[in-house]
Amino acid sequence: MNTPFIRNHQLNVIKKQAEFLQKTLRTVADRKVLETVRYSAAAAILDAFPVLTEEQKGRLGQISGFETAYEFQRYLGALESELEPFPSITAKQIQKLFPKNKKLKLPELSSIDFRFVTYLGWSDIATNRLFIVYPFNGQFVGIEGRITPTHKKGYCLFCNRHQELAFFSVETKAAYASADNISRYGHYVCLDNEACNHSITHTEALEKFILTARK
């Protein structure tokens, strides 16, 4: 059995390139153009992984030789079996990440397919709060803040997807600051966290937001 080596956001890169390549195959007849697109698709996929074995490179690079929808479907289905899921987490662990919130609304962990999760996010509609849990340097990090729907579409900071947005605002405080010295840090993110997880293709913006919000 192969060792899982693909994270959710990397699978999203592969899906995006597979979709683009299939569309090109349906609409372009020029063989030179097709070969260029095949090469660029395979290169974009490999670039999404900082480290790969030669065997893994070979499996991922197979996409450049596909012709039919069935081949692409079978390829993506096989790669799903090599997904490295979001690290196992319990309700008690989540509660410890938000010690000040005594009435914390927890997500339904049993209903989540953690293979397709880059960050664990859920909202408490009653309090207009958004909670995010993310594994960073071997430990879980949790942030919470106010979520305000904009009722407009735009590009999400985390997944760069054009979708309905909300403004996520987190209170921040410098070390050793007084209780009154509190500022806010915020950005526009997807209102639908699950859809965001299905679209995110990199973690840099997400990690930068989390690190800034925790300062």
Image (cartoon, rainbow, N blue to C red):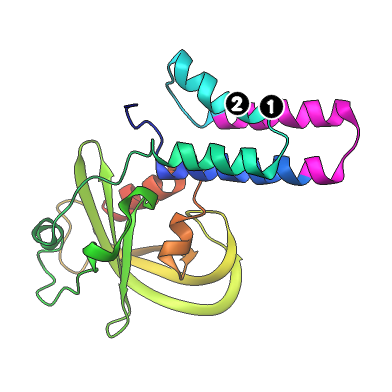
Which class describes the residues within 10 Å of circle 1: few (<14), some (14-19), or many (20+)?
Answer: few
In the rendered image, residue 8, in percent from the top left (x then y), is placed at: 42, 45
Q: Can residue 202 be seen in this view?
A: no
| Residue on which disc 2 sits | 62
Q: Does 44 appear in magenta?
A: yes
* Residue nearer the viewer, 88 or 77: 77
* Residue nearer the viewer, 185 or 26: 26
Span of residues in magenta: 24-45
Q: Is mark 1 on a helix, strand or loop?
A: helix
Which class describes the residues within 10 Å of circle 2: few (<14), some (14-19), or many (20+)?
Answer: few
Q: How many marks?
A: 2
Q: Does 111 appear in magenta?
A: no
Q: Which amino acid does label 2 sit on?
A: Gln
Q: Is residue 32 left or right of residue 106?
A: right
Q: In the image, what residue occupies the spot 46% across and 22% down?
A: 56
In the rendered image, residue 30, in percent from the top left (x then y), is placed at: 91, 32
Q: Can residue 117 be seen in this view?
A: yes
Residue extending farthest top: 54
Q: What residue type is labelled 1?
A: Gly
| Residue on which disc 1 sits | 65
Spatial separation of the CA atoms under disc 2 and disc 1: 6 Å
* Residue nearer the viewer, 47 or 116: 116
Q: In this view, does 170 lie to the left or right of 51?
A: left
Q: Is residue 138 left or right of residue 2?
A: left
Residue extending farthest bottom: 126
Q: In the image, what residue occupies the spot 48% across and 65% down?
A: 190
In the rendered image, residue 203, in percent from the top left (x then y), is placed at: 43, 43
Position of residue 53 relative to residue 195, above or below, is above
Q: In the image, what residue occupies the spot 34% across and 53% down?
A: 119
Q: What element carries label 2?
A: helix
Question: On the image, which quarter does residue 36 sit in?
Answer: top right
Pointer 2 with pointer 1, Cβ within 8 A: yes
